[in-house]
Image (spheres, grey):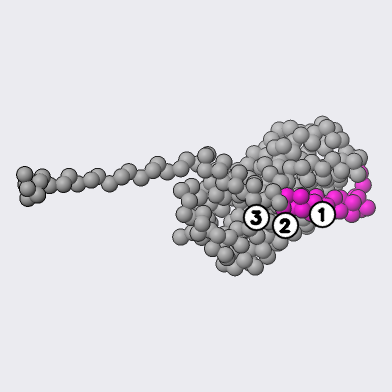
Amino acid sequence: MTLLDTPATTAVAPAELAPAARLLPSLAAVYRAQLARAKVARIPLLFVATFQSLGILVMMRGVVDGGDNPAAHAVVAGSAVLVVAFVALNLLAQYFGKLRATGGLDHYATLPVPPAAVVLGAAGAYASFTLPGTLVTAAAGAWLFDLPARNLWVLLAVVPLAGAALSGLGAACGLLAKRQEIATLLGQLGMSAALLLGVLPAGNLPEPVRWLRDLLPSTYGVEAFARTFAPAPDWAAVLGDLGVCAAVGLCSLTAATWAYRRATR
């Protein structure tokens, strides 16, 4: 048989693409990577965020009476959640703003992971740093203002829910800002809003400022935690505030995922 008699070569079928990465494994991988990356900065972040909130507690103790006082409840709860705002909102806005400015988002865009996994993984890693500082701040506030500390366990629900809401907002600010400096500014403004509107008692604020306070994602986490300092907490109201906080967190993380897709186009 000669070469001319050789049968035609059979066409090779194209290889199938690998299946798309699932959300939960991708989320776990991004979370672990971000957690390992931030280990070096963990102690400074915790110290700065916690020291800032403790300083506010000491300052407010000079003007707000302790004991069974709604103003004292608001100050302690707001100062504790402020630790979450400092890390989850302010620093996450700066982080995503830097990624966009330096082209770091292009690296994530090439990975076979869903956009939601990138946003949720980074948000979860940053929010994880806040729990120890939040507990320390809440315990110190309860001691300074003579409040019961038996319900501090509620922070185990408040921190992840408020952290999700603030992380989504911070990530969206960093991803939508066209310049890194603007992302830093938005993060600082958001943290300042959490400070002024979350720590100050709502009863002393003008009505228009209260409306702005209701728009802040962390407000409902502050309200839920503040209710637990009452002699007989209204647990239905606490669960209602936590439910609203969870819904706001879902919306803010969805917005952050959309902002990520928009920034990586």
Question: Is residue 92 something one can see in this rendering?
Answer: yes
Tell me what residue is drawn at x 79 percent, y 54 percent. 48
Mark 1: amino acid: Gln
Closer to viewer: mark 2 or mark 3? 3
What is the C-alpha distance between the residues marked 1 and 2?
A: 12 Å
Q: Indicate which disc residue 52 carries.
A: 1
Pointer 2 residue: 191
Quadrant of the drawing holding the N terminus? top left
Secondary structure of the residue carrying tag 1 is: helix
Residue 182 lies, in percent from the top left, at 63, 67
Nearer-N-terminus badge (1/3): 1
Tell me the crowding category of disc 1: few under 14, some 14 to 19, or many 20 or more residues within 10 angstroms, Cα based. Answer: some
Stretch in magenta = 41-66
Q: Tell which residue pokes out farthest to the front in this image.
A: 1
Task: Decide: few, some or many residues near mark 3? Use Cα within 10 Å; few <14, some 14-19, many ≥20.
Answer: many
On the image, numbered disc 3 is attached to which residue? 92
Badge 3 marks a residue whose secondary structure is: helix
